Image: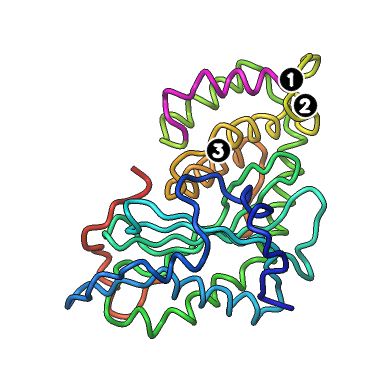
Amino acid sequence: MNGTLQNTNYQYIMSLIIAKNKVQFEALMGVETPEATDSHMPIPHHTLVKLTREAIEAVGLSIVEEEHSLARGGLRYFGGFALTGKGIDGTDRQVVLGLRNSHDKAFAAAICIGNRMMVCENLCFSSDVKLSRRHTLNILFDLPRVIADAVARVVAHWNDMGLRIERYKETFISSAQAENLLVKLVDSKAIPARDLYTNVVEFRRHMEGSENPRHVDFVGNTLWNLYNAVTENLKGGDLSKLPFRTMTMQSIFDKLAHHVPQLELQEIVTKGCEDNAPEGEVDLRN
């Protein structure tokens, strides 16, 4: 059935997102949503999930796995939905919708469209749609439309990511070039400085002639090798920062690979939030 979870075995879906404090959907219902103020209307986590499920069903896609996690005592939420359907089928990768929300004004509610590589379960995002600048009083009225707009981008994202992967596979780089690119990722805050050498080692592990590659699918002196080295080391990190980190990496790698994205970062604001002054929000790009 479209929009419904096709496999309810919780052990099966544990690998969709690597995060602490994973919970089942029912636990979201028990999270207390803070009271609204004149300028801030918190969105219940379970409401976002429900509306996202409905939007997925409306465009004829199906959820094959879903997973949820909570942080800061339930104040912050991140969820993942692995999708299938016409136009997004593949054996090597899978479309994942990421959903994030906060009750402590740490970041705006957002839907992130990404991919999970099936051979390694590495997760990366390429498109980020903020649901609001601030959780203002009109947000619940606008949410269904905004979420539907975001979900409608899935097929276009799938096609764009396919082109990006092919360009990365065709772009050969030396070990020195890989190291310079990793320094750029540190400078742009796409990866923590403490992980620089770990990423170098992961790239070298998959260069031609390496004796013990983690995943034979990624062996080669290419940008694709480096891309997967980075996403491998991003596993288990801060999920709220993962969309920014992977999208920043792609913006740097795309130039080298001569890939022009068909999708650009989209930000949809709700009525009454056009002042671009997010109250109390932390920019995830910092």
Residue 42 drawn at (x, y percent): 30, 71
Task: Work out whether mark 2 precedes mark 1 in sequence or the reverse, and give the earlier one.
Answer: 1
Specify whether residue 264 is in view: no
Q: Name the residue tied to disc 3.
A: 235
- Left or right of 36: which side holds 13? right
Mark 1 and mark 2 in contact (Cβ < 8 Å)? yes
What residue is rendered at 74% in x and 50% in y? Answer: 93
Question: Which x, y percent locates residue 26?
Answer: 49, 68
Q: Which amino acid lies under the numbered mark 3 shown in the image of this protein?
A: Lys
The numbered mark at residue 240 is: none
Contact, mark 2 vs mark 3 (Cβ under 8 Å): no
Magenta-highlighted residues: 191-206
Residue 80 picture quarter: bottom right
Label 1 belongs to which residue?
A: 207
Q: Which SS type dominates the magenta stretch?
A: helix
Callout 1: 10 Å neighbours few (<14), some, many (20+)? some
Q: Is residue 79 visible?
A: yes
Magenta segment: does it hold 197?
A: yes
Under mark 1, the amino acid is Met
Asked where in the image residue 7 lies, by quadrant, the reply is bottom right
Label 1 residue SS: loop
Q: Secondary structure at mark 3?
A: loop
Q: Between marks 2 and 3, how big is the CA–CA gap?
A: 19 Å
Look at mark 2 in the image and give the residue it sits on. 219
Q: Residue at x 37, y 72 (%)?
A: 44
- Which residue ends up furthest to the bottom in the rendered image? 141
Between 195 and 246, which is closer to the camera in this rendering?
195
Residues at marks 2 and 1, CA–CA distance in whole angstroms? 6 Å
The answer to whether marks 3 and 1 mark residues whose Cβ atoms lie closer than 8 Å is no
Residue placed most toward the observer, 258 or 16? 16
Q: Quadrant of the N terminus?
A: bottom right
